[in-house]
Image (tube, grey):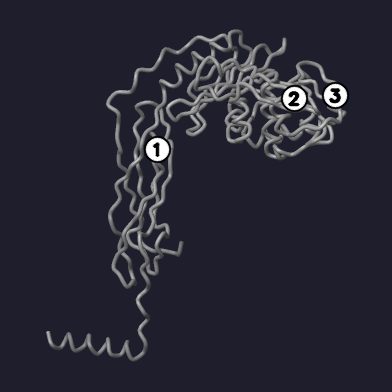
Amino acid sequence: MRLRTGLVAVFCGVLFLNSLPAMAAETPGISSLSAVVYEPESGLVLYEKDGDTARPMASTTKLMTALLAAEKLSPEATVRVPAKALPVEGSQVGLAAGEETTVRDLLAGLLLASGNDTANALALLMADSLPAFAGMMNEKAAQLGMTNSLFVTPSGLDEGGHSASARDMALLGAAVLKQPVLAELCASKTASVTYGGRRMTLKNHNKLLSLTDDCIGLKTGFTKKSGRCLVSAVERDGITLVIATLNGGDYWNDHLALYHYAFSLVERQLLSVQVQDTLPVAGGQKDSISLTVSPPEDVVTKAGEKITACVELPRFVWAPVRAGETVGTVTWFCGDRPVAFGVITAGETVDSRPVPTGWALWWRHVKQILTELLR
């Protein structure tokens, strides 16, 4: 945007306030030692129980392996299973060294059947060794803001200090949902795959997909050290919540109870704003321009939360101004927390007035003198 002069006017107004918030469900008691309920769009944490303590997270680790694979490998690429990926303890889909399959089918084995062999295979397709891949996992964790995590294995087998907090795993789950191939697989109850010449149908270990129709993933995990771990996601009425629980007993009912509670705490609110119709233009062939506001349609907020809109506009702009050029901004707040941003643009083009020539300036001066004498 070109340099403009003039003071900026700021207007803040209340858009609406629900008279009474919806009655929240009772806070549940859960078996899991750590839990976080996270709404990714707003960044709201709706429930927390010991959310920052790092604990072994078992096969929910595979969400990180899957995320890196989705970013670095083509799902439809045909690959050979690295011999170094086998053998491995724990759950497997039965891969054989050197056999051909696709990255997508390895991801299905990883996310639905929780194959440790598929985890190693994918890791070794991206790195020279499993320790090198662990370095990639930790680098990605740092990028996601996972501050209480240490990845050692691609499968989640207990080794060294392999661990993460519930808050970190909720952030990871939200990142996985942004990858279409992963979101599709995590929401699938079954998947048909081919490893070598063998065709098989894999079943998803996540029973939450059958316990509630709006579940869209994500991943289970269990070792004797970690206990029962689960990262899940539910989409309801246009709002997606991600829950991560670590070291639980009845983790299915933990998640169902937390969803019932957390969805009563949030709502999606429409956004609107009142802005003046025109803005003065200095030095232009027109005296003003019309204004256009492009707000987002709605945002997720806590139930009953008040939204205010703050408009920033200069008192005038200098010509030339082009249609679509940004001339101001709108910020919507819930309390002190910004929840959405919009721009105010020029609705039309206004060119500068022509610069007068020497004779034109002389004649304008003469007219001004004559006008004064004739008054």
Q: Which amino acid does label 2 sit on?
A: Arg
Asked if residue 279 lies left or right of residue 140, the reply is: left
Q: What element carries label 3?
A: loop
Q: Which amino acid does label 3 sit on?
A: Leu
Q: What element carries label 1?
A: strand
x, y percent for residue 218: 60, 24
Dividing the picture into quadrants, the one containing residue 117 is: top right
Reading the image, the residue beneath label 3 is: 86
- How dense is the environment of label 2, judged by Cα within 10 Å: few (below 14), some, or many (20 and up)? few
Tag in front: 1 or 3: 3
- How dense is the environment of label 1, judged by Cα within 10 Å: few (below 14), some, or many (20 and up)? few
Q: Which mark is residue 199?
A: 2
Q: In which quarter of the image is the C terminus?
A: bottom left
First in sequence: mark 2 vs mark 3: 3
Asked if residue 24 lies left or right of residue 173, the reply is: left
Of residues 32 and 187, which is closer to you in this image?
187
Alpha carbon of mark 1 to alpha carbon of mark 3: how far? 49 Å
Q: What residue type is labelled 1?
A: Asp
Reading the image, the residue beneath label 1 is: 298
Alpha carbon of mark 1 to alpha carbon of mark 2: how far? 45 Å
Tag in front: 1 or 2: 2
